[in-house]
Image (cartoon, rainbow, N blue to C red):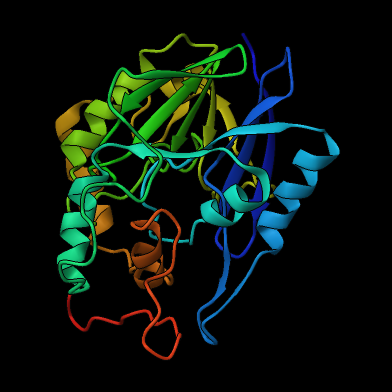
Amino acid sequence: MSPIVKAFFDTATNTVSYVVRDPQGASCAIVDSVLDFDHASGRTDTASADAVIAHVQAENLTVQWILETHVHADHLSAAPYLQEQLGGQIGIGNQITTVQDTFGKVFNEGTEFQRDGSQFDRLFGDGDSFHIGQLRADVMHTPGHTPACMTYVIGDAAFVGDTLFMPDFGTARCDFPGGSARDLFQSIQRILSLPDDTRIFVGHDYKAPGREEFAWETTVGAQKARNIHVGADRDESSFVEMRQARDATLGMPKLILPSLQVNMRAGHMPEPDEQGDVMLKLPVNKI
C-alpha cells in the first residue's frame, strides 16, 4: 500500500516533517515535528507545528501517531503541542533509554529525571509493527547517527530520519555520544535491502553543491546507485574512514543543547523552578 505523504520543510533548521496518511481512510501519523526556537532570545513559537495542524484539520484527518525517528540534536520537537491539539500517541525507539542515560549525566539532571522512556507513549523495538488506519508500519532499528535511531517503513515508504540524506548529499554524522560509523553503515545496508522502488523520505536537506532546490524524496534504487557516501557498493572500511574524517571537520549544531534537553523528554520542557520559570542548561566543555 502506498501512503499519501505531505512534507513540511523548516528553513530555519533544514528539517522535513511529514504527515503520512492511510490512502483508504482519514488516519494519519506525523513524523519528526518542529517546535520553532530562537536561540538568542530563548523563545519558542508554534508556527511550523501550526502549519501541520492546519493541514490535518483541513483534510479532516485523525492523528493516531506522532513519531520521532530519534532524539534530534538540531531542532526541538513539537510532539506534546501536536498531541494536545490533535491527539495521537508519541512514539520513539526503545533505545531512547540509552540516550536519556547519556545526556541525563551530561546535563546533570539528577534522579528526578526518569531514564526509562516513560515520557513517551510507545517505545518501539526492532521488528515491531503498528497500523495507521489500514496502513501497516514496520519498525527498523537503524543506529549509527545515534543509538536510538529508527526507520519507519510505512507501506512503500521509508522514513529514515538522519540516517540517509539525498543521494547527492550522503549520510548522517556519527560523532555524537553513542554514535558509530560502523553501525551506521550496517543500518544503511538494512535500508538498502528494501525493494528498489521503496520511497525514501529524509529528515533534512541542505541542497548539495550544484542543486538549486531543496529535496527530500528519493528511492532505495537511487540511493544504491548514486549516494556519494554509500552508493556503488562502497565497502564498510572505506565508508568508516571517510565518515570519521568528515565528522572531525564538523561543528556542533546550533541548537544541540536545547534540543537534547527537550527531545529526550518527548518534547517537554524541563520542570519549572519554584518561581514557575523554565530553564535550559548550558553545560561547558561537555559535548
In the picture shown, does residue 68 fall above or below 47?
A: above
Give the x, y percent position of residue 218.
57, 27
> Is there any visible trace of residue 67 in the rendered image?
yes
Give the x, y percent position of residue 91.
42, 38
State the residue lying farthest toward the bottom. Answer: 275
| Residue nearest the observer in this picture, 104 or 201 | 104
Q: Residue at x 41, y 12 (%)?
A: 194
In the picture provided, is 162 more to the left or to the right than 79?
A: left
| Residue nearest the observer in this picture, 152 or 88 | 88
Q: Residue at x 59, y 57 (%)?
A: 81
State the residue lying farthest toward the right. Answer: 58
> Is there any visible trace of residue 207 in the rendered image?
no
Give the x, y percent position of residue 66.
53, 40
Q: Residue at x 60, y 65 (%)?
A: 12
Give the x, y percent position of residue 75.
48, 61
In the picture shown, does residue 249 fall above or below 192?
A: below
